Amino acid sequence: MFNRNLKSALTMIELADEYSARIAGEIKSKITILDEINDKLDALSNELVLNENLSNKEDVDNLIGEMDDLINSVKSYSQK
């Protein structure tokens, strides 16, 4: 989801010949979505720290894997 919104925003920027209020609004919308993803990652991290009683190791591994994927997406976005 993060990468899809990132690619969409970058495509709008690349294809725009000149400033457009509509495109600026769409890009701001994409940035809001990306910020929400970051907020959800923070909440997920807090939940992991607070919840020591996850049902099994597989649940923990899945949660950590999802967090790693999201962190890598954020890093990719930051490098562009």
Image (spheres, rainbow, N blue to C red):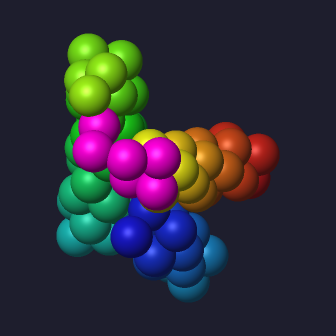
| The N terminus - image quarter | bottom left
Q: Is residue 7 above or below residue 63?
A: below
Residue at position x 60%, y 48% in the image: 68
Q: Residue furthest front?
A: 56
Q: Quadrant of residue 40?
A: top left
Which residues fall within the magenta stretch? 54-59
Q: Is residue 15 above or below residue 66?
A: below
In the rendered image, residue 61, in percent from the top left (x then y), is placed at: 52, 50
In the rendered image, residue 59, in percent from the top left (x then y), is placed at: 38, 52
Q: Quadrant of residue 39?
A: top left
Residue 49 is at least partly visible in this image: yes
Asked if residue 57 lies left or right of residue 45, the reply is right
Residue 20 is at least partly visible in this image: no
Q: How many numbered markers are drawn? A: 0
The stretch drawn in magenta includes residue 61: no
Q: Residue furthest top?
A: 50
Q: Residue furthest bottom?
A: 15
Closer to the camera in the image, 7 or 27:
7
Closer to the camera in the image, 34 or 14:
34
Q: Is residue 48 above or below residue 70?
A: above
Asked if residue 10 lies left or right of residue 79, the reply is left
In the rendered image, residue 53, in percent from the top left (x then y), is placed at: 26, 28
Q: Is residue 2 above or below residue 28?
A: below
Residue at position x 26%, y 66% in the image: 26
Closer to the camera in the image, 32 or 26:
32
In the rendered image, residue 66, in percent from the top left (x then y), is placed at: 48, 55
Residue at position x 27%, y 45% in the image: 55
Residue at position x 47%, y 47% in the image: 57
